[in-house]
Structures are given as C-alpha cells and as structure tokens.
Image (spheres, rainbow, N blue to C red):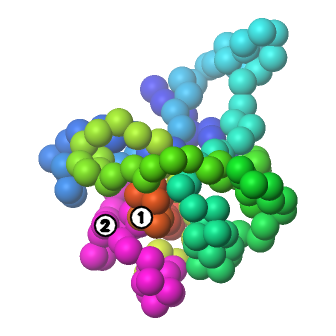
Amino acid sequence: MWDLHCPILWRYGIQSDAHDGCIGFDWCWHREGTNSSDHEVGGNPMKLGKMMIFVSDLAEAKRFYCDVLGFPLKAETKTRMDFVHEGCDFIAFKCETNTSVENYSHEARSVFVFEVASVDQALHELRAKGVRFLHQTPAENEFSRYAAFIDPFGNVHEIYEAKH
C-alpha cells in the first residue's frame, strides 16, 4: 500500500496504455508505516533541499523564469541565479549546451511540476507569453490534470491542477 507525502512533486515516467504512453504520476511515493528514520543518511532525515536546473544562457533564463513564469530573482552571479520559491531553493546554473526533449515520458528524467489553481487558465496565459507546450490540451490521470512545457533550454516542466 502506498501513501502520498511529498510537498515537492516529481513525475516518474512509468509506462502504461494511458494517454501518450505514460501514467504520469505527479507525486513522490513513500510506503505506509515508514518513518523519518527510514530515510536517514548520515544520521539525518533526507528531504528535498534544492531544485537545480542547468541553462546555457543566464539572461534568457532570467527572462523566462522571472518574466514569463513569475519567479522573483533572489540573487545572481556570473554562473548562477537563485529564484524565490516556497519550499526549497530554486537555482539555475550556467552550462555549456542545451538538452533535447526527445522521447519525453519515455526516457528517464526529472521534471519540475508546478501546482496551479487552473491548468486551463495557466496553459492559456503561458501560451500567450510564447511558452511551448508538449500537450495541446491538458492530460489527465487519477490524481491531476497537467500539461508539460519546455523552457528555452530543452528542460521539461509541468503545470498541474490537483483533483479534489
């Protein structure tokens, strides 16, 4: 039996006959009956402390993550930017090359899944700002409605609306 307990949501590319060939779980999974000592490393409970993303152009990352997605800039250096994000640090580091989207949901990867009040409204607003989505309409699973989008560097993220 599984229990959902994760404030920062990750998507596992588990294959199924569902939409677009994947289930698209938007949750971290922990077994019932486990406690924090079961997740200790070095005597401390493990928890998500930072979300890091790699980008080839910091100026474009600032435009996209601040102006388009609305994350305020907390700090900036020649090699990284820190964004204001509730829950854990959100950091963009400068890298050499972009990644590619190929076979999204069929290849292993990490995906930031951002919670929104309305996927339809967020999809409309972000498209109007030029954001490129992989889903023409929101996809759905038993937990949520969601839509995947691509940043200017080929990183895939999702917006999701929880089902109540």
Give the extent of the magenta segment. 121-149
For the point 67% across and 13% down, the residue is 38
Q: Which residue is under mark 2? A: 134
Q: Secondary structure at mark 1?
A: strand
Q: Element type at marker 2?
A: loop
Where residue 109 sits, quadrant-wise, is top left
Q: Earlier in the sequence, mark 2 or mark 1?
A: 2
Answer whether labels 2 and 1 touch (C-beta < 8 Å): yes
Q: Which residue is mark 1?
A: 150
Measure the C-alpha gap from mark 2 to mark 1: 7 Å
The amino acid sitting under disc 1 is Ile
Q: Nearer the viewer, residue 129 or 96?
A: 96
Residue found at the far left of this picture: 17
Residue at 77% x, 9% y is 42
Residue 159 visible in this rendered orientation of the protein = yes
Q: Is residue 42 left or right of residue 106?
A: right
- In this rendering, the answer to whether 36 lies above or below 104 is above
Residue 58 drawn at (x, y percent): 64, 62
Q: Nearer the viewer, residue 138 or 106?
A: 106
Report the mark closest to the observer, 2 or 1: 1
